Image (tube, rainbow, N blue to C red):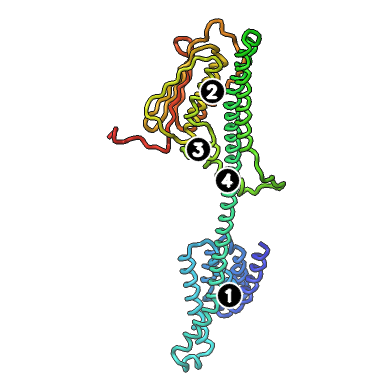
Amino acid sequence: MVLDIVLGVASAAECAAEGVRFAHDARMPVALGVVLGLITGATLVLRRRWAIAVVLISIAVTPAEMGLLLGVVGLYTLAASEVPRRISAVLAGMAGAGTFLVTMIRFRQDNPREAWGAAVWEVPLFSLTITLAVTAPPVLLGLYVRARRRLVESLRERADGLERELSLLAERAEERAEWARNEERTRIAREMHDVVAHRVSLMVVHAAALQAVALKDPEKASKNAALVGDMGRQALTELRQMLGVLRSDVPAEEKPVPLASVAVAASAAAEAVSASASGIESVEDAAGPRLVELEALVGQSRAAGMAVELSVEGEERRYAARVEQTAYRVVQEALTNVHKHAPGASTRIRLAHRGAEIAVLVENGPSERGAADAGLPSGGNGLVGMKERVSTLGGGFVSGPTDAGGFRVSAVIPDRTRTPDRARTA
């Protein structure tokens, strides 16, 4: 604003001085010419708000040969403003044409003999040179400033956009990292529950039987004691395997983790979970239990006094490790629940191979009257863990009591590495 006032004062002074000459040429009072010059020159203060009006005023006073500063600054402001370029070009052309005509007429009036005696092209060339010197520099400078300002604004907008995108990426990375941590904690808790609950449940059952027959049948007590020892060793072995996966040989560095590393780690964790859901084997999955171990699992429950019947339907084959491990854990947890909640009940296990999926059914009858309760605690996480395992692979899980007073667990687990025979549906 201060610059505009200074330019307005200078322009008013220039136009007032030029108004004296205009008053003499027009044969009008000098005071009127000075006042006209002051008013005309002072309009330069409004150049930022009304650039077009200022340029039009400078064009209008061109025949009076006043307002040089007004015209130059007005053209610069017009070219540098956001006025459409075609309007700026038209006004700059009008200002140039007016300057060209006035210059040529004034040159011939001041030098009549030399002008008429010179070559025809010399006077127009001289006038054109003066016109370009007055109009071209301010217009070109204004266009340059306008382009530079737009470039700076564009770069600033891009920088702001990148900053917003980085902020969103950081938030998403934190969310995905937290989600990956929660998924890993849930998976570890589920594995710990499946491993510990089944083994310890059998150990408690065998320990109760050992206590009951310790004095009456020492040979059976010794056999039960051996079974308890085997169960404990198996539980410790599986726990060591799980804890070995969690242990890292590389010590963590005491420094903050870069945000990019968090994002990559979160993406990797998400891809790992997605890959496992699609049936891709990992090191942990490959080391997990398989369906061929079901007979041994059932044998352990039979040794604990449970009447278990295992039937297999369909053509037996190998599935993805993740699928076989899930089916094994479903049967394992179902047997654990029978030991906890229905001691002495008969149990039926049905395993069916169906094309690109495997179906598991574990159903037990009511607990035998008079059977001793082992007093095993229940956290209520067994059924939830089974459903989470099956749902992760895109399967279906149903559980609930039967009409006969027992309980049924059913799961259908698809094998993502196989595609169903579409010829049947064609």
At horizontal 37% and vertical 29% (from top left) the residue drawn is 315
Labels 2, 1: front one: 2
At horizontal 49% and vertical 34% (from top left) the residue drawn is 322
**Are discs 2 and 3 less than 8 Å apart at CB?**
no
Q: Nearest the camera: 78 or 228?
A: 228
User: What is the quadrant of the N terminus in the image?
Assistant: bottom right
Labels 2, 3: front one: 2
Q: Residues within 10 Å of mark 3 (few under 14, many from 20)?
A: many
Q: Position of residue 118 (x, y in %)?
A: 47, 93
Q: Which residue in the structure is indicated by mark 4?
A: 168
Measure the alpha-carbon separation of dots 1 and 3: 80 Å
Callout 1 secondary element: helix
Instruction: Mark 2 or mark 4: name the one nearer the start of the chain.
Output: 4
- In which quarter of the view is residue 158 placed? bottom right
Labels 4, 3: front one: 3
Q: Which residue in the structure is indicated by mark 2?
A: 333
